[in-house]
Amino acid sequence: MLDEYRQSSAGGTRARFLFANLQQRLFSSIAAFHRTLTTHRKSLVKKSEDCDPGPAEAEAELLDDNDAIEVATHQAKGELGDLKAAIANVDRMLAISAVGRDLPDGRVEAILDWIENEMLDADYAWRDRRLILFTEWEDTRRWLVERIKEGLLQRSIGRVELDGRILNFTGQTSLEERDRIKIAFNAPFEQEPVRVLVCTDAAREGLNLQARCHDLIHVDLPWNPSRLEQRNGRIDRKLQPSKIVTCRYFFYDQREEDRVLDALVRKTEVIRKQLGASGEVLRLQMESTLSREGIRRGETERLADSITQATSGRVSIAERELGDETEKRVARLKEEQERLQRALDTAKRRVGVQGIDIRHVVEIALRDDGAALQPGRFSVPEAVLLDPETPSFLKDPSWAALFDELRPGRPASPKERARWRRETPVRGLVFEPPKVREGEPEPQDVVQLRAGSANSDSSLSGFSA
């Protein structure tokens, strides 16, 4: 039906871009498609002089998903042909999507099966495993969270415990909340209840989530190969302790458009393995083709083949240029590393500041204040505890700032500082790089105190005071 709507238009560049956007939302979820269609219809019925959604060059990230559709509709109005016929087409699709958005979804059932088999025991208690779910659209994220919660409660007959188990990461998540989510998702399982993180593409960059997660599911697939790589990169990265990282996506045999998306995923992996950074030329080429034209029924085999066979003379140029630059950059880095190592060795000889020296200074300062470092229950055996409940610390409010530095994250607002302090334990202290066994994640519950670091400077000034 969407294809029929597309064929009824004049077929200009802006109309094709609009239909590609509608198609992406349809492939994401009926819920996202329905809301987008509703916005699209409202834009169609508005008089052109009343519709001014803003400059077309506005940053896409500053626009809500459906604001972007409103802009695309406004730009494509002249290419949609008879607007009354367009509205009639939309109304027919809305009648179907209004019913379809509440029907069972095969992907949700598959995700529930996986959670039930891999993350829950026979009594529906959570095991020590975490999962990331990615979707491009906020409407799909909301729908997905509701369906997962409903499904788990139905399957467990209300026995499964959901409080704090599912977290959300979207473009509206505050910086403070982002920090808290990252810390919680990487924390030991016995310390944090979270098991499932549901994300929009706002989480595809700047988050290292590999410490205790090696499973990721793409609920929908971005048409931008770089975004697909960035999503996977949240867990498929250095310092990932698991030998196996699994990133899954869905493929409907009966939906011919999925052959194109499957080809896109496979080509993205080929580019990553064989071309690296020089493959960006092909990534942009594939994204441009899909975003400009969408995936037309009857042309899926041709489009899938073109993606599989995609190449460009510009790739060879990029490979040569990047290869030369890479060799020069590696040589510079090796030279810089050797210089810094020599400087470090010289500084150690002159100053004599080792981890044991810093610990000795700290212990003397604490002893004078009637306090001491204590054994702690941390992931690193050699880590020690500086207890904020020590009487001498409670008497002197100046210690509060130091303990705030030792707590992970930050309070959402000054008003929440007291509660944050009560609920957030301080991290342990180590004076040398922590000893981590091979295959174990990087510890999240300790801080290394070393000369010249911000933590060391603030800590030593606290001890001096």
Image (cartoon, rainbow, N blue to C red):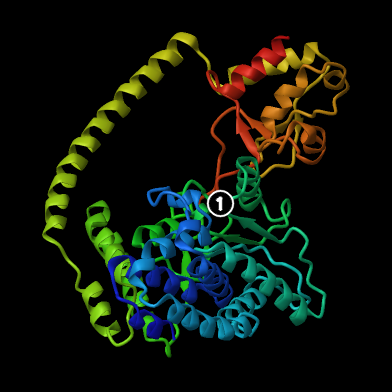
Quarter of the image with the C terminus is top right
Using the image, determine if residue 2 lies above or below residue 413.
below
Which residue position holds label 1?
171
Which x, y percent locates residue 433?
54, 33
Is residue 12 in view?
Answer: yes
Which x, y percent locates residue 380?
64, 41
- The residue drawn where x is 16% and y is 52% is 319
Q: Quadrant of residue 401?
A: top right
Identify the amino acid type marked 1: Gly
- The residue drawn where x is 46% and y is 79% is 84
- The residue drawn where x is 73% and y is 75% is 150
Using the image, determine if residue 412 lies above or below residue 246.
above
- Could you say which is closer to the camera, residue 292 or residue 306? 292
* For residue 428, side relative to residue 207 (left or right): right
- Could you say which is closer to the camera, residue 47 or residue 153? 47
Which x, y percent locates residue 40?
50, 69
Residue located farthest toward the bottom when viewing the structure as drawn: 254
Is residue 270 in view?
Answer: no
- Could you say which is closer to the camera, residue 8 or residue 231? 8
* For residue 307, side relative to residue 31 (left or right): left
Dot 1: few (<14), some (14–19), or many (≥20) neighbours within 10 Å?
Answer: some
* For residue 43, side relative to residue 417 (left or right): left
Quarter of the image with the N terminus is bottom left
Which x, y percent locates residue 86?
44, 78
- The residue drawn where x is 70% and y is 15% is 462
